[in-house]
Amino acid sequence: MDISMLKQSLAQYGQEHLLAFWETLDDHDKRELYKDITEINMRDVTTFFKRTTDSLNEDQEKLDDRLQPVPSEIYGSAAQTSKEKLKIYQNEGLRQIAEGKVGVLLLAGGQGTRLGVPYPKGMYDVGLPSHKTLYQLQAERIRKLEELAFDHTGVHGSIPWYIMTSEHTKEPTLDFFARHNYFGLKKENLIVFEQGMLPCFTFDGKIILENKNKVAKAPDGNGGLYRALNEKNILENLQRRNVKYLHVYCVDNILVKLADPVFIGYCISKGADCGAKVVEKSFPTEAVGVVCKVDGKYQVVEYSEITLKTAQKRNPDSRLTFSAGNICNHFFTTEFLQNIVNEQEFSLKHHVARKKIPYVDSNGDIIKPEKPNGIKMEKFVFDVFQFSNDFVVWEVPREDEFSPLKNADGAEKDTPTTARHDLYSLHHRYLVAAGGELVHDKHMPIILSEPSPIHNGNGTIQETNNNEIKNSNLKWKGPMICEISPLVSYAGEGLEDIVCRKKFQPPLCLRHPLEKSFNKNTCDKGEH
Ligand code: UTP
């Protein structure tokens, strides 16, 4: 350890306070701190800080005059597309999946501070009857989609699943999948990698010490993806596997349709290099980023970046003019990503997140601040839209595809309860569309007298054990509990043979016979 050299270099960047406790540390702690500091590229991070905070002033200028909505010719909408056309898109997506050309990439490096659990959000169990975690639901959707692609084409294709984690989430994620036998996926098709970390700064540009021998660091945002794609050789992996199209999405949307063949097929048929799935913004002041054009380039603009007047602007059909609500659900060609990684990554700006960052004070005490005391610098995954030459947008009904888990129960929105209820509601609609019915009047006959095997061509489907129904019948209150395993249906397909003209008493769980027991297959209790 060359401490005098380190002191000099820190002084050059105004960060010599990082060694304030040096003399009080034992050898082990000295080595830890030395490693922690020397891993940081001081020139880069102080440049990022300056660039980010300088642009804060510019950013506060409202963007209204430079803003245009996404042109209608590149704005598709599932609700306004004919069934025939949707089928064409879907078939194209399934064909590409069967050929092994489609991958999915999960952004799971966030710290999930609002949800407040000490493990990765993907391991969260929102309390479905099956107790499946977000990771398990996603794994099973991939499995089902591979099966559907095979049924459609007769060709077996795998969907490789890339999972971007961070220092906090990598090991627990790897361990979780291993303990659960990769939820039936092939181990080699699960590629877990780690994004970079950046030091946290005070508002005046000093790097924060979390404790005497540790620098406060945070993941570099979901846009850290582009750097990680290069540094962790993921781009190379995509190319080696001949994956041409990637669906990138966030961990927290319980309704996410991974590698949605309709979306993939739509993007491919439009020749897109980059696409965004969106939902219609609900009301002008909703805190959701909106996909639009700024100075002719595609971008996601936050509500705070425009005036209320612009946010309230409506088209003749009364829809909001800026209505394309971003749900972090993107399509990229591998070629586009290669260009981003090689040519554009460095120019992507960091954004400032003002956060409460625990720190060590001058007495050596750890302080947990009650209001934001510093900043984390984050890149955003959607900031690459500006580089697209063939950008498209695909709007889907929110109730079918978007219900994020952000907060713990008790918050107003985006909680385990809202996620659970949104999933029940969607699955209930699948059931009804397939001719089934849920009944919750306790005087209605219970249709399932025994766990009765029903055949659907794929095998046997078992419903919830009747005893569970009877017991819960008396105390049951609340929403129509209806959960359909992704192994039974990816998006409502294939249910007619199972449910048509049948009445079911909630809670209803439709599961595949391969799912021996819900409890065995899912998250250990300790992880909830
Ligand atoms: P959020 O911005 O909602 O952050 O991330 P979060 O970490 O999940 O939650 P809070 O803000 O701390 O409460 C949106 C998506 O981006 C991923 C998250 O894992 C989530 O899927 N993400 C976020 C990353 O992959 N890396 C990051 O550095 C930040």
Image (cartoon, helix red, strand yellow):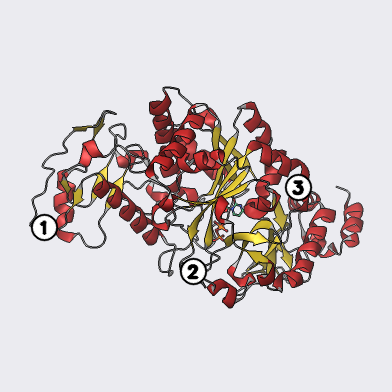
Mark 2 surroundings within 10 Å by alpha-carbon count, few (fewer than 14), some (14 through 19), many (20 or more): few
Nearest the eye: 12 or 388 = 388
Q: Is residue 144 left or right of residue 240?
A: left
* Mark toward the viewer: 1 or 2: 2
Q: Earlier in the sequence, mark 1 or mark 2?
A: 2
Q: Report, in whole angstroms, how far the alpha carbon at label 3 lies from the one at label 1.
A: 61 Å
Residue under pointer 3: 344
Q: Is residue 486 left or right of residue 156?
A: left
Mark 1 surroundings within 10 Å by alpha-carbon count, few (fewer than 14), some (14 through 19), many (20 or more): few
Q: Is residue 464 left or right of residue 398?
A: left
Residue plotted at (71% across, 68% down): 364
Nearest the eye: 3 or 68 = 68
Marks 1 and 2 close (CB-CB < 8 Å): no
Residue 316: which disc?
A: 2
Most distant residue in the front direction: 316
Is residue 117 something that shows in the picture? no
Mark 3 surroundings within 10 Å by alpha-carbon count, few (fewer than 14), some (14 through 19), many (20 or more): some
Q: Report, in whole angstroms, how far the alpha carbon at label 1 lies from the one at label 2.
A: 48 Å
Residue under pointer 1: 442
